[in-house]
Amino acid sequence: MLTPFGKFSRKLRIDNGELLKDMAGKLGVTSSYLSAVENGKRNAPHEWIDKISDLYSLSPEDRNDLMQAVQASQKVVKIDFEGISSEDRNAILALAREFKSLDEGDKEKIKNILLKNKKRRG
């Protein structure tokens, strides 16, 4: 099943009259690797956001759509714990472990807290 990244990249190829192997060549990967990323068997490398944006001269809006598609397609997320206290690390891991069992109201509260903090920093 195509991931959001897979849908984005397939549309981009169609719009540019390209095949999967054409895009894979531009990205410096095999067709099978690109296909695995599009189908959610592998994570899309974050470096591809800039690379695809540059290769296809994406508008700021399309680049943002690509970034969201890459993020929405991630099955595994790595967290850099360097400089994070043991207490904060435990809180992050607890949230990750328990997230699926939270009700929608609690998830919404957490999301709002995070978005509010992002706006303050931004």
Image: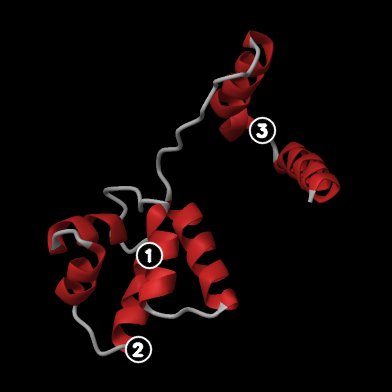
Q: Where is residue 74 in the image (x, y as percent from the top left)?
A: 43, 48
Give the mark nearest the N terminus, 2 or 1. 2
Q: In this view, does 35 lie above or below 106?
A: below
At x 76%, y 36%, the residue is 106
Q: Residue 21 carries which label?
A: none
For the point 54% across and 24% down, the residue is: 97
Q: Name the residue under label 1.
A: 51
Q: Can residue 95 be seen in this view?
A: yes
Residue 27 percent location from the top left of the image: 25, 64
Give the position of the N terminus as an image quadrant.
bottom left
Mark linked to residue 15: 2
Q: How far, Cα to Cα, is label 1 from label 3?
A: 37 Å
**Quick one: label 3 or label 2, which is nearer the N terminus?**
2
Secondary structure state at the residue bearing disc 1: helix
Distance between mark 2 and mark 1 Cα atoms: 17 Å
- Nearer to us of marks 1 and 3 is 1
Q: In which quarter of the image is residue 98?
A: top right
Q: Which amino acid does label 1 sit on?
A: Lys
Residue 108's place in the image compared with 98, above or below, is: below
At mark 2, the secondary structure is helix
- Residue corresponding to mark 3: 102
